[in-house]
Image (cartoon, rainbow, N blue to C red):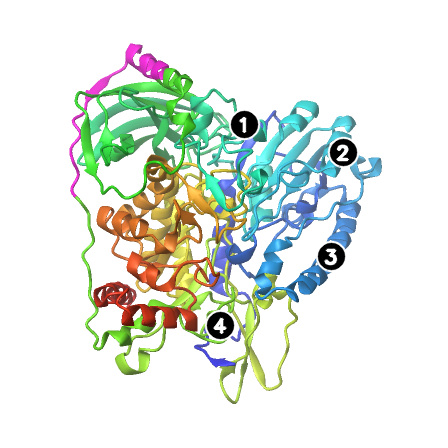
Amino acid sequence: MTNQIHSGTLEIKLSAREEKHRRFARKAAAEGMVLLKNEGVLPLNVDSSIALFGGGAVQTIKGGTGSGDVNNRENISVYQGMKEAGAVITSESWLMEYEICYESARIAWKKRILKAAENVENPFDAYAANPFSMPEGRRILKEDIKDAQVAVYVISRICGEGKDRRKEEGDYYLSRSEQEDILFLNQSGIPIVLLLNVGAPIELTDILEEAENIRAVLNISLPGQEGGRATADVLLGRAVPAGRLTATWARRYEDYPSAEDFGYLNGNLDTEEYREGIYVGYRYFDSFGKRPLFSFGYGLSYTSFSMGYEGIKRTERGVELVVSVKNTGTVYSGREVVQVYASLPQTESTKELKRLVGFAKTKDLKPQESQRLVISIEQSYLASYSEEQHAWRIDAGTYGIWIGEHSDVLQPVVKIIVQKQTLIKRTRAVFPSNTVSDEFFVDETARRKAEEWIRIAEQKKIPSLVFVPWEENSRSSQPHLADIQPVTELIPLLYGNITQGASTLGSAGMRVPGSAGETTEALEEKYGIRSLIMADGPAGLRLRQSYEVDRETDTVYGAGVLGSLENGFLEEIKHHKNADIYYQYCTAFPVGTALAQSWDTELLREVGEAIAVEMEEFHVDLWLAPGMNIHRSPLCGRNFEYYSEDPLLSGIMAACVTEGVQSHKGCGVTIKHFACNNQEDNRMGVNVRVSERALREIYLRGFEIAVKKSRPVAMMSAYNLVNGIHAANSWELCTAVAREEWGFEGVIMSDWNTTVPEDGSVPWQCIAAGNDIIMPGNKKDDENICKAYEDGKLSEEMIRRSAGRIFQMLKKLG
């Protein structure tokens, strides 16, 4: 038991804040749903008789597992959402039987977890190694579809922290049962609607070719607690789909550039070589002529749009493009996303065929209504990195600017002419240039294809603008040195609050039950420096649903790791006499990918503001989000937390969420995981080998955009090694790049327990590198740092710099 600050409430009833955020979560979920196919079947008529199947119909998966989960009050399934909307469901006996099957599978899974937990030091490891899989329902019978006019089949996947997805049936591929169900429905002749309740791509090519009666496919993603109601809104036409994909869906798994070498597939979890270089996602599919099933940025609507170029002008940061959009339909209002891509000259180095350089989303346009959008393109978005010159460079030549509704349907609208190569940003030589062979960099096929796109732009009779790039000034951050004497009193600031059990996920935070951790309280009594409370994200705040407080001693009864997961399902709540129950019902918003699929910057700001409201209510200072690693492979178990395969989209979305959260004084974000945390298997030990160019253009770019646009107060370093050095021990990442190049002034903290493994991050080297706080903190961290200071390995200035940055963060957060 420990003293705490009563972050919860004694009221169990639904609060006004909960109700408001429920409505907003429903809206956000619908905005991020992507209509992938529709042959006249959607929207459904509410009076249509619907045969509803699939485990996700009854138990719709709201989000991922692990630290990205939210212990919210209630989840709305697709079945419940459709019933509330007045839909006629003909397959209720199948759905009821599945519910029984599901509950039985959950009990068996719980027993397996508890048994596995007996043999590991950290129970979370047993949880991560044994993810729950949705059980298969019984075979669909003719009676289940009797009188049905349409069949809706939900395909669901569970994924989460600590384990990557598998290239197996029932995960990346459809299970045999799913295939048989869909083909049975196909033989009935009624139209089929597939709902994809998944956090990342699955392979659908064969089933879409074989089952001709699949008339519609809707990707609902992992839509948060209100997913069922939002799905009903879209299916029944009460909300018009306006989401667009943020990752490429391949026709075959083998089409991805890192396919057979990813993670566990090549038998080597110690080293991951990013040999595809800059060719990630659509950059690869475009440049190497791979035709995807669904392209980056793709998504349909219930209405149609036209868009036209209206002009371009210079700005202080680059150029502005003006595009008009019109809803050309006659029935439905709707929203369109204007996507802007640039094709780049191939004069100095091979570049991708095209890259996203800007986007904007319209308001809700009524039939025949129009809107003019102004889209900013910063000059840095046209630059490529030169390892030889250690600089960001805009090459001389023609830059074609293309607009369209997704990456495969574009029209060139204007040419930007650069007459002289310009180094716009000089950098320090930090990362070895020979770390990995980027075999695709020298591919002539990609170069010729990209040159052809430039020729198309040059030959088109479209306007042109002569653009003169300029060298940008350095944004180096100013050091803040803590002045407390002696320096040894500052050392406790460099690791989290050391408490019993603090080394395990979910139990490190003591003042707010279920919070992820706290900074030290060791300086509170003498210097008035309070501890900061941190909570996991990024789909909401991850706290315990409830906790008990002794009435006489005013202390809280704790819970173990398993008690903080799965709404407490894995660990029975022990009720105590003379104790009050406090409730902490947070909102489970859609996951990061689902939010980004809205392509709606204002919506993401609103999400940030809603998160901040809950942070204020539950006394949380730092939200451990947004997550913004790149979708390098569809098998990464944590892709659902991240936004996109594209760094520009990722960076802008993260910046918007950050602005929303930090618009509330006292609330801060922690962008993560810096950097290359793109797999979960052996995430604490894998060495990512990547060229400096690919690292800067793809894997660091989103972080750079977020840092410069929104000034997050904190950043979290990744577990993995980057070119042989743990991210938390990397001076190149934490200091040279983040602080000296980008001007990041905030605090960098480690991911949880990065120093615990024998071959993990070295505590004192974290501080020397500029990783200011080691989380969640343990006695060995303290001993290691103190000894390094005594031995002269860690200087007084290094300690004072990290402590100074922590003081600055405390000042910003009040």
Residue 469 belongs to the span the image colors magenta: yes
Q: Amino acid at mark 2?
A: Glu
Other-residue count near label 2 (Cα within 10 Å), few / some / many at <14 / 14–19 / ≥20: some
Instruction: Look at mark 1 in the image and give the residue it sits on.
Output: 255
**For the residue labelled by badge 2, is the local secondary structure a helix, a strand or a loop?**
helix
Q: Quadrant of residue 376?
A: top left
Q: Which residue is mark 3?
A: 103
The answer to whether marks 2 and 3 mark residues whose Cβ atoms lie closer than 8 Å is no
Residue beneath label 4, please? 8
Q: Where, by quadrant of the figure, is residue 445 drawn?
A: top left
Task: Choose the circle earlier in sequence order: 1 or 2.
Answer: 2
N-term mark: 1 or 4: 4
Circle 1/circle 4 CB separation < 8 Å: no
**Would you say residue 432 sits in the magenta stretch?**
no
Amino acid residing under circle 3: Glu
Which dot, 3 or 4, sits closer to the camera? 3
Q: Is residue 25 left or right of residue 188?
A: left
Q: Residue at x 55, y 60 (%)?
A: 72
Instruction: Determine the CA span between mark 1 and mark 2.
Output: 26 Å
Counting from the top left corner in percent of width and height, residue 283 is at 42, 28
Magenta-tinted stretch = 451-473
Q: Is residue 744 above or below residue 198?
A: below
Measure the C-alpha gap from mark 2 to mark 4.
48 Å
Separation of marks 1 and 4 at Cα, in angstroms: 49 Å
- Mark 3 lies on a secondary structure that is helix
- For marks 2 and 4, the one nearer the N-term is 4
Q: Which residue is mark 2?
A: 180
User: Could you say which quadrant of the image residue 713 lies in?
Assistant: bottom left
* Mark sitting earlier along the chain (3/4): 4
